[in-house]
Amino acid sequence: MRVSPKLTRAEAEDFLFEEARLIDERHFTEWLQLFAEGSFYWIPIVEDSDPTRETSILYDDDALRELRVTHMSHGRNFAQMPPSRTVHQVTNVQVWHEEGQDEAFVRCNLVVHEIRTGDHLQLGLGDQRALASKCEYRLRYQDGQWRIALKKVVLINRHLPITNLSFLL
């Protein structure tokens, strides 16, 4: 096994800030390229659950993530008409490494501000909302760069009804 370089907090912050920018600017194809092959994007209902055995809000492998981006990019995506505008705020970044692992573990807090413009008579349109979460990343050093092996977003309001979560966190 080839040992990866140690990921610093500043490098992790730069990586997470770039991911946030790609999502906010709707560069979804480039966002997909941040993921390693065989990776997962997971939003659990129960924080320490097994996503293969329990229901999650979202548990996307490579194929489902690509399908999600295809739907979000399509002009007739009714859940995103009009498309969400988002601002991701990443804070409290921490990084650690486990001995002998070719991965880095990153934890951060994330607040996503989202709004969809439109007719005030449509439920949720014109209302800005903030979704707060804590995130865990497993980053794998691959082909000379860090890639996401796991992105886990734990929403603090995950036990309450969440309307139209058809955008990326």
Image (spheres, rainbow, N blue to C red):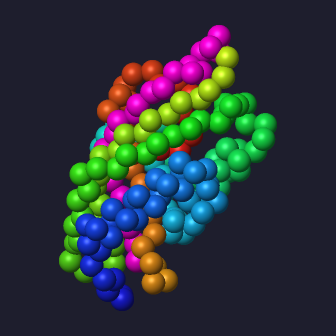
Q: Which residue is drawn at 65% across and 36% down?
A: 83
> Is any part of residue 138 visible from this angle?
no
| Residue closer to the observer: 2 or 71 | 71
- Residue 156 position within the rendered picture, expressed as x and y whole percent measured from the top left: 32, 33
Q: Which residue is drawn at 66% across and 22% down?
A: 118
> Is any part of residue 108 visible from this angle?
yes
Q: Which residue is outermost to the top?
A: 121
Figure quadrant of residue 146: bottom left
Indicate whether 96 appears above or below 57.
below
Give the magenta part as a residue range. Answer: 120-141
Q: How many labels does the image show?
A: 0
Figure quadrant of residue 12: bottom left
Q: Which residue is drawn at 28% across and 68% down?
A: 10
The reply, left or right, for residue 120 in relation to residue 146 is right
- Residue 4 position within the rendered picture, expressed as x and y whole percent measured from the top left: 33, 83
- Residue 50 position within the rendered picture, expressed as x and y whole percent measured from the top left: 38, 46
Q: Quadrant of the N terminus?
A: bottom left
Indicate whether 24 appears above or below 29.
above
Q: Which residue is outermost to the right?
A: 76
Indicate whether 41 appears above or below 9.
above
- Residue 167 position within the rendered picture, expressed as x and y whole percent measured from the top left: 56, 40
The reply, left or right, for residue 46 in relation to residue 167 is left
Verify whether residue 132 appears in magenta.
yes
| Residue closer to the observer: 136 or 23 | 23
Verify whether residue 30 appears in magenta.
no
